[in-house]
Structures are given as structure tokens and as C-alpha cells.
Image: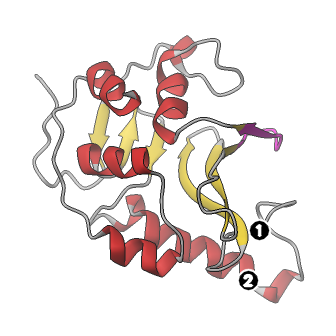
Amino acid sequence: MWTQRLIELTGWKPLGITVDWAETEGELGVALPADYKELCEAFGGGVFGDSVSFLGRAEDRAFDLPTQWRVFLSVDRDSTFGDVSAVDPYAIYAPGGKGLVPWGSTEWADAYYWLIDAERPGDRPVLARAEDGAWHRYDMSTSEFLYRVLADADFSPFGIARYGLGTTFDPGSGDPADRRPR
């Protein structure tokens, strides 16, 4: 339902991407939200409203969730600066544990994650960190959260509709061909 609303909001023609979810989820050690998979298959990875980056499954490594998760995990485990985490008071999710998996961000340094606990595989709330560092928990689907960010000016502090940036989607790599309506 929310994925369809995003498709209508953006005027996007779904790509129908085929993804090997077993491989992706096998690496993560946990199932990803069903609506997130729908979003990936429809959009791939890219940028909504010229400012909201969405990590999907994409050939463009900058918008590929597993690639970015690996980077976040390696940085989070880097002991160069001690036990400091970029997502304090949380940690980046490691298979079998509890932590955050990044799936989106904005040009203003807002960051979107799922809180994943391997012992509670069906519970994946959205945790969003605002540019001021404050954490906000949303017990809603990824696609509903993303829709509200794009369309609800009152979705504080994350709604971008109040800035009049539009609701376009630009694929990360341009491949397959840009399918935005002209």
C-alpha cells in the first residue's frame, strides 16, 4: 500500500528489478522488511526529492544497501578511536546481534536505519537521527516513513514537503534507463 503511494507520488514507473533476497539476507543474517523489498524492486537505489538518499539493491555502490552496511560495520568496528560509535548509543548491526542497518539519509545529515535484533526478527522499527543528533523511533514500515518524509510537511523533524523540493526520484546509476515521466 505505501510502496504504491510512493510510486504514485513520484510518478515513477516501477523497474521490476529481480533481487536475490536470499543472498542479501544470508549475508545480513536477518530478513529485511517486505515493503523495503518492494521499494527496491520498484525503485532500485537513488534519490527522492533531490535530497533523500535511498539505499536499495543497485549496481551503483553508493546506493547499494549491502555495500553501505559493510562500510558502516567496518567503521563501527574500527578501534582506532576506542569504543566510540558513529551511531551512539547504538552500534551497527552485525549478524546474530542487535544494532542498526542504514537504509537512507538526507543532504542535511538526517540518517535512517532499522533497529534489528536477531532474536526478534519480525520487529524492525525505523530509527531516524536528525541532524541535531536526536534519535526518533517510528513503529511504521519503511515505505510509510519514506512517504511521510516526502509528502507530509508536518512530519517533524523529517518532513521535507515544507521545502518544496518536489517528489521526484532519480536512480543512483541511471541504469536501467531513467524512467521518470517527461
Check disc 2 and report its element: helix, strand or loop.
helix
The image position of residue 129, as x and y in percent, is 73, 44
Check disc 1 and report its element: helix, strand or loop.
loop
Residue placed most toward the observer, 96 or 101 = 96
Q: Which residue is mark 1?
A: 91
The image position of residue 117, as x and y in percent, is 69, 65
Q: Rate crowding at label 2 as few (under 14), some (14 to 19) or many (20 or more) other CA atoms within 10 Å.
A: some
Q: Quadrant of residue 95?
A: bottom right
- Residue range in magenta is 128-137
The image position of residue 131, as x and y in percent, is 74, 39
Residue depicted at 89% across the width and 79% down the height: 83
Mark found first going from the N terminus, 2 or 1: 2
Left or right: residue 22 versus residue 100 is left
Q: Which residue is mark 2?
A: 77
Residue 133 on the magenta span: yes
Residue placed most toward the observer, 24 or 112 = 24
